[in-house]
Image (cartoon, helix red, strand yellow):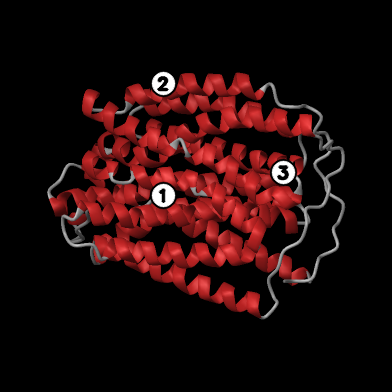
């Protein structure tokens, strides 16, 4: 029975990694696709805007389906759908922007399943919520780290098509393995245990969700702006450093593309943030008041945005890393608060609603990136605006209830695997 909980954490964590990698790697692939198709990168990036809308909107029906048919089954749907959609992206005819946009919409739609299904699944079956969210977040950050490395390597070794097709095949295999595990009764689900010191009433629920609706929407804009804008920032601000590295390797007879180094830089952001999130899950989230941690993380985001806007080279890189680390601190806190203040039977809808709000900001971030870059030639103005946004998030977060004194859970009795 204990193994069932561990398997849940494993499959959910793998899903977290693949989902984040496959809903973000287009930001790196588009740099090569622009050259291959002889189209502006900004125009090709806009093709992903409808997918980001689906990444938010589909979270709600996916959450409902999870409540109705079970989280394990919906995770299988996510793996298979995400895999097939990614493979479809790799098979579109050259220059067919409509086909590519439709295939990207598949990635957005099936990627939306993860957070409304997998996060609640982990929290319900975890003995230590902060630790489980730390592990799960580490895998998610690993996926974000890979969104730069995997396409960079596959494009260098093969082509942009391989950057879509290979991850898609991996996703299909994981989905089939999970389906087999469910059929064998080795993976299941259970109701949410009640946390000590948490008063779950209608008034508390609406207070938490109203505050988080504002902070999550604004934080979503920051998250998506860093995710999709970092590669474009690094391509300019790290140009001297990248040129020196390429020249050094070229002297040894090793030719590399700029996209590889930009991908490695973006990957570094999420490698560091993943380790930080795991450490915070073990050392902070399970030990300190959630509200105080959330407010501090939001306030520090101001400094990260200023570094991205005004810093050059490695300062901008540090700003992006800092922003990802702080977002990694905020995300698990939001998830735990929603899980604690929402009845178990409505977890899917609760998390679906959260990620409609959080990922609904994705299209806005992408359109802002394209507009600001076309208008000013850089993204400095965008990140200055997001520094002000971070101040607003901090002030609103102060309205969260402050009675979360004891984050520990009673040791639950594992339920039979379904």
Secondary structure found at label 2: helix
Q: CA distance from mark 3 to mark 2?
A: 32 Å
In the image shown, does 90 or 153 lie closer to the viewer? 90
Query: Which quadrant: the N terminus?
Result: bottom right
Check residue 283 in the rendering and tell me which mark sits there, or answer none.
3
Q: Which residue is mark 2?
A: 385
Instruction: Find residue 162 and report its image quarter.
Output: bottom left
Q: In the image, residue 222 lies at what x, y percent?
A: 46, 32
In the image shown, does 259 or 60 lie closer to the viewer? 60
Instruction: Find residue 65 and report its image quarter.
Output: bottom right
The structure residue drawn at horizontal position 76% and vertical position 46%, both measured from the top left corner, is: 343
Q: Disc 3 or disc 2, which is closer to the eye?
A: 2
In the image shown, does 46 or 129 lie closer to the viewer? 46
Q: Which residue is mark 1?
A: 267
Q: Is residue 263 above or below residue 398?
A: below
- Tell me whether the residue at label 3 lies in contact with that at label 1, contact meaning CB atoms closer than 8 angstroms: no
The structure residue drawn at horizontal position 33% and vertical position 29%, both measured from the top left corner, is: 312
Secondary structure found at label 3: helix
Q: Disc 2 or disc 1, which is closer to the eye?
A: 2
């Amino acid at each position: 029975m204990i193994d069932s909980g561990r398997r849940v954490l494993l499959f959910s964590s793998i899903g977290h990694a693949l989902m984040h990698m496959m809903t973000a790697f287009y930001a790196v692939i588009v740099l090569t696709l622009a050259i291959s198709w002889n189209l502006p990168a900004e125009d090709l990036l806009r093709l992903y805007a409808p997918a980001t809308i689906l990444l938010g909107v589909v979270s709600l029906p996916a959450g409902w389906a999870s409540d109705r048919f079970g989280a394990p089954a919906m995770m299988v749907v996510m793996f298979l759908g995400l895999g097939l959609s990614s493979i479809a992206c790799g098979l579109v005819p050259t220059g067919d922007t409509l086909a590519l946009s439709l295939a990207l919409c598949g990635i957005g739609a099936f990627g939306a399943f993860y957070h409304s299904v997998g996060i609640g699944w982990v929290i319900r079956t975890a003995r230590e919520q902060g630790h489980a969210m730390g592990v799960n977040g580490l895998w998610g950050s690993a996926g974000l780290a890979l969104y730069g490395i995997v396409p960079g390597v596959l494009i260098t070794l093969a082509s942009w098509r391989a950057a879509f097709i290979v991850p898609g095949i991996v996703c299909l295999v994981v989905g089939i393995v999970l389906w087999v595990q469910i059929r064998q009764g080795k993976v299941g689900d259970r109701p949410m245990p009640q946390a000590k010191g948490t008063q779950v009433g209608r008034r508390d629920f609406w207070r938490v969700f109203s505050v988080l609706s504002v902070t999550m929407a604004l934080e979503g804009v920051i998250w998506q702006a860093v995710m999709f804008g970092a590669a474009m920032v690094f391509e300019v601000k790290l140009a001297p450093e990248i040129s020196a590295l390429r020249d050094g390797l070229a002297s040894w007879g090793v030719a590399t593309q700029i996209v590889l180094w930009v991908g490695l830089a973006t990957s570094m952001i999420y490698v560091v943030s993943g380790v930080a999130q795991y450490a915070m899950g073990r050392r902070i989230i399970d030990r300190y008041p959630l509200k105080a941690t959330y407010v501090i993380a939001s306030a520090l985001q101001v400094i990260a945005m200023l570094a991205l806007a005004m810093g050059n080279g490695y300062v901008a890189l540090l700003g992006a890393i800092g922003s990802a680390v702080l977002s990694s601190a905020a995300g698990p806190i939001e998830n735990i608060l929603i899980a604690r203040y929402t009845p178990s039977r409505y977890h899917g809808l609760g998390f679906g609603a959260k990620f409609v709000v959080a990922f609904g900001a994705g299209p806005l971030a992408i359109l802002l990136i394209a507009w600001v870059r076309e208008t000013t030639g850089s993204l400095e103005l965008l990140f200055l605006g997001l520094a002000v946004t971070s101040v607003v998030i901090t002030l609103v977060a102060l309205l969260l209830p402050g009675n979360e004194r004891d984050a520990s859970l009673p040791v639950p009795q594992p339920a039979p695997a379904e």
